[in-house]
Amino acid sequence: MCYAIPGKIVEMNNRFAVVDYFGEKRNVLNDNQNIKINDYVYAQGGIVVDKIDTKEALKILKFWKQKFFELKVVDKNLSQIKTGETAKKNKNILAILQKANQNRTLNRQELLALLRLKDKDELQLLYKLANNIRQIKNDNACCVHGIIEFSNCCKNSCHYCGIRKESHIQRYRMSPEQIIKTAETAVRTYGFKALVLQSGEDPYYSDEMLELIVKKIRALGVLVFLSIGLKKSTTYRKLYEAGARAALIRFETSNEKIFKTMRPGTNLSARLNLIKKLKKMGYLIATGFLVGLPRETEGDIIKNILLTKKLGADMYSFGPLIPTIGTPLERQRLMDKNLMLKIIALTRILDREAKILVTTALETLDKNGKKEGLLSGANSLMINVTPPDFRKKYLIYQGRPDKNKQIGKNIKDTVDLLFSIGRAPTDLGI
Ligand code: SAH
């Protein structure tokens, strides 16, 4: 099974190109000089990552042709708001949802009112509206990226994180050869077209080592996505030149006081400055926050969403705090999954064309989290491709549902889920 559909280049203008998927057009960036009009390509995150032989592409497209349109029908049915669903609801809430539906700006009070919703029917209506906006703006496309967790060593002491330097866990570092081999398997055996390389903030990996890893993985014809935390901007520049094109780096919280307490020895402005610099450098940015940190208010959550938007996030990444044994937050209460679904829905309302990730943490919080997230406005996800022996030691939090799952099984379950709700792994463009 593949999670990227090849598309045909139908227009080109310097670094910009248009890719056609069965008549549906997406704008993309292309820096591969060898690509011409009428070539078939794979695009990820709005970037052309690989050219594909026309014969091979047509074979894959033959499988997709019927499925592509069947899936759209399923998605469209699931995301329609039917008359009758709005009956007997609180008038004030209905008015806010209607305003959101008309793409009129919601004020702070209105956003807070949505974030505070409790009534089951009203919640369903909010999720449905967000899902409907997602369908109208992005159709049934869903980004699927692989993630390799290559080191659980970290020099930081973040209070929420299970791999903080004080944690008594078994540490590991994958060698560059192991990382590259894992990527090769992810690409050649499992068909991934985008790979996230994640680790703690681990100074062990020199710029030269990271450059080599990025170069080799980029050469496999995939989008290389870095998630390595705060590093010098010169390091990120070198890695851009080596072929990395996306960076996942959450600011964690927009509340400076909470940031300072939760991440001793680090500061919010340094992290925000780096995110801004990476955006300027040309990286696609995935950023966002943790939900449920101590002393966080609903106002903070709204600010977090708005800051993610202001940073120009190409992808929103936020997830619930999973209190982790052995960390200072081990006694924190596990949050209600509806809070996460509301945040996904609000984000969709505030940034209608966004790519919004459903994170493994949401699935850890609730076993239906992935599906419900996708039905509340989300349209991106990641599948773990770390070899199981390492994966079980990547304990940023405990209880991950993919902890012992075989990669192939995890992929099958995810693709089955996507198909059941009518989503296709086409690229969303830029
Ligand atoms: N070192 C990288 C990657 C960090 S791990 C960096 O600094 O960006 C990826 C994300 O996991 C973090 O950004 C954090 O938001 C999240 N995380 C850490 N501990 C968590 C926990 N206990 N529950 C849920 N998410 C957690």
Image (cartoon, rainbow, N blue to C red):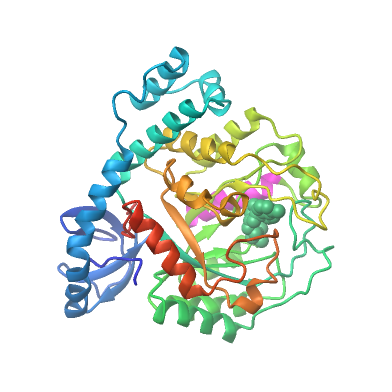
- Nearest the viewer among 309 and 373 is 373
- Nearest the viewer among 389 and 253 is 389
Residue found 72% across the figure and 38% down from its top: 256
Q: Position of residue 246 (x, y in %)?
A: 48, 61
Q: Is residue 338 left or right of residue 14?
A: right
* Image quadrant where residue 289 sits: top right
On the question of residue 9 being in view, the answer is no
Q: Which contiguous range is marked in magenta?
A: 268-281
On the question of residue 252 being in view, the answer is yes
Q: Is residue 271 left or right of residue 37?
A: right
Q: Is residue 312 magenta?
A: no
* Image quadrant where residue 8 sits: bottom left
Q: Is residue 176 left or right of residue 131?
A: right
Q: Is residue 53 above or below residue 168?
A: below
Q: Position of residue 378 (x, y in %)?
A: 44, 46
Q: Position of residue 307 (x, y in %)?
A: 56, 38
